[in-house]
Image: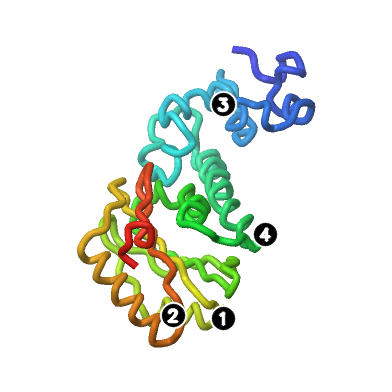
Amino acid sequence: MSGIKSWPQDERPREKLFKSGEHSLTNTELIAILLRTGAKGRSALDLARDILGRFGSFGKMSHTDIKQWGGLKGMGLAKIAQIRSALEIGRRFREEEAKDGRAVIGSSEEAAAILTPRMRHLRKEVFKGMFLDSGNKIIEIIEIQEGTVNRVNPAIREIFSKALEYFAVSIICFHNHPCGNPIPSQEDKEFTARLVEAGKIIQINILDHIIIGKRKYFSFLDNNLI
């Protein structure tokens, strides 16, 4: 099979990117650019098609482990690392964009939109705090703790310690449910109640606790639980 270099220049992914912009590329072409080279008898585009055939989408490709890449011919550790790194950059971009732009949070929907892309595919429960100033502008977003596949138990003391460190006036808490169902457990409800009460004592407001599932999120505020 002929390699990409033998193709007309306008059809090569890299040349197409510079001529028409990255938005014009297919998912397969974007992956091919990351891979840079193919394998014996196969182009980078062939490998990219194999990857998308295996996982189906960038979302399903996220947070995979090395075993799930087994059997993809031509995909060594270096190429797998390139793909996984690029996916992580994409997830982090949304958070950094919100922080750098000092986004003002006016609803649970706006808050969830920032963290859902990165958190909905995590394989373990992770607890994050979004720290806000008096105008509800984002000061910082911090990962407080990583738990197990079905539990995360952050120390309330640590959450407020971070809030004081960043001179935050209020906090929106987040954690994910890897099972995909964002409905809070009784333990989630009890933890949130303790968190709210502790916040009252030190005068830091808990605006919301958002649980992120695969396709939906649950807001304690929207459901009158805060």
The residue depicted at 40 percent of the width and 80 percent of the height is 199
The answer to whether 83 is drawn above or below residue 217 in the figure is: above
* Mark carried by residue 101: 4
Q: Which residue is mark 2?
A: 160
The residue depicted at 34 percent of the width and 68 percent of the height is 226
Cβ atoms at labels 2 and 1 below 8 Å apart: no
Q: Label 2 to label 1, Cα distance in Å?
A: 10 Å
Q: Is residue 225 left or right of residue 47?
A: left
Which label lies toward us, 1 or 3?
A: 1
Where is residue 1? Give x, y as percent.
Answer: 59, 12
Tell me which numbered mark, 2 or 3, is placed earlier along the sequence: 3
Cβ atoms at labels 4 and 3 below 8 Å apart: no
Element class at badge 3: helix
Q: Which residue is mark 3?
A: 28
Q: Which residue is mark 1?
A: 167
Element class at badge 2: helix
Q: Amino acid at mark 2?
A: Phe
